Image (cartoon, rainbow, N blue to C red):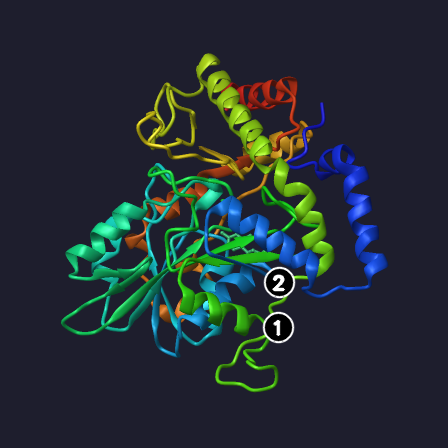
Amino acid sequence: MKVPLLDLKMQYAALKKELDEALIRVAESQYFILGPEVDKLEKSLAAYLNVKYAIGVSSGTDALLLALMAIGTKPDDEVIVPTFSFFATAGVVARLNAVPVFIDIDPVTFNADPADIERKVTPRTKAIIPVHLYGQSADMEGINSQFSILNFELERPGQYVNKKTGQRICVIEDGAQAIGAQYSDGRKAGTIGAVGCYSFFPSKNLGGFGDGGLVVTNDDELGELLRIMRVHGGKPKYYHRVIGGNFRLDALQAAVLSVKLPHLDAWSEKRRENASLYTKLFVDRGLAEEEGRVSFDANNSVLLPKPVYKSTALRNYHIYNQYVVRVEHRDELRKHLSEKEVGTEIYYPVPFHRQECFAGLHSNDADFPASNFAAGHSIALPIYPELTRGQIAYVVDSIAEFVRRA
Ligand SMILES: *Cc1c(COP(=O)(O)O)cnc(C)c1O
């Protein structure tokens, strides 16, 4: 049985008529950059995410870069990022000649470990970028508590100030994998910090027909800056108080995304059902004991992800952009699954502190045990909405075969 990691053709087939119409509508208008299609998408997204400003941009990476530029990140400023994420999270910091400062992840959620923040904040800290990895919100309250301990007060949403020193630190959320996810207080992941960033890369839960992204904020000043800086920073056009870039979203992407957005929640629900079925089958087959275990033993050959705060009182909502388990002999399992025609991917094999390009930062490898463990043992299994129960059972059976043989 073939089980690809992702099959976008099925989603296209289901919406083909509407999507084709949208593409032709843009072709006939010959209005390709920003314009009415982008305006319409931005309005829908602002309503969906319940934010004041939703601004379409050229990619998730550019969303992060633009956000850092808008808060005024300067050379030698420090930006705290989890060491275990997609490269862009740290890459954008370095591109502004600022310094990425790495923190470890929580071994259960894969998200930034707030406990690691306190000792990494310095007078040069400008921002922190929590990542809502795999589609689950980072621990925003945990981050908030750390800043309280350090005598930073929340001045505006996602903007902390130390009244004694005047230092300000912004929270920029990397929600590239988490559009539609919800933090446990009911707010959408990506709408709690000073700026939230999303990606419409085709493999994300809401994917375009190419690159695209979004920045959101509830702050009037930042909303205005982000909008101006998306188009080089001129206001009025050709008159520059600030320097931006070409971070524009194009009309074709916006038209496609407007067709897909109404289906996003149903797709995320399907992903969650698929995740539950994986969990049930792994437990039924005796490969895992429960979700969220962080070490291997007789009853845990497969460590399952955990949608934390599952209780009904707290409304954490994981949208499973990825379903990532941890196994021993990961690379051999991957080879076995590939022979079984099951697609997998490693997100991510090398944490930032081990990247050659960041060697100059002299990070201490032993400071990041959870990230190192995740990098060596994680494997993403197919989780896309159109998967059948039979396919999921086949993936689990194929893993069981490998584990029993090993
Ligand atoms: C995909 C992704 C990005 C970058 O988004 P692009 O649209 O591909 O530029 C940034 N951060 C994370 C965590 C991502 O998964």
Ligand 1: give its quadrant: bottom right
> Can you identify the residue that label 2 sits on?
58
* Nearer to us in this view, 377 or 52: 52
Residue 362: percent from left, percent from top:
34, 67
- Horizontal relation, residue 107 to residue 271: left or right: left
Question: Is residue 265 visible to the viewer in this orientation of the structure?
Answer: yes
Residue 194: percent from left, percent from top:
38, 60
Crowding around mark 1 (Cα neighbors within 10 Å: few <14, some 14 to 19, many 20+) is some
Residue at left offset 40%, top offset 31%: 307
Q: Quadrant of residue 237?
A: bottom right
Q: CA gap, disc 1 to disc 2?
A: 8 Å
Nearer the N terminus, badge 1 or badge 2? 2
- Horizontal relation, residue 365 to residue 337: left or right: left
> Can you identify the residue that label 1 sits on?
246
Residue 299: percent from left, percent from top:
37, 19
- Horizontal relation, residue 120 to residue 316: left or right: left
**Mark 2 residue type:** Ser
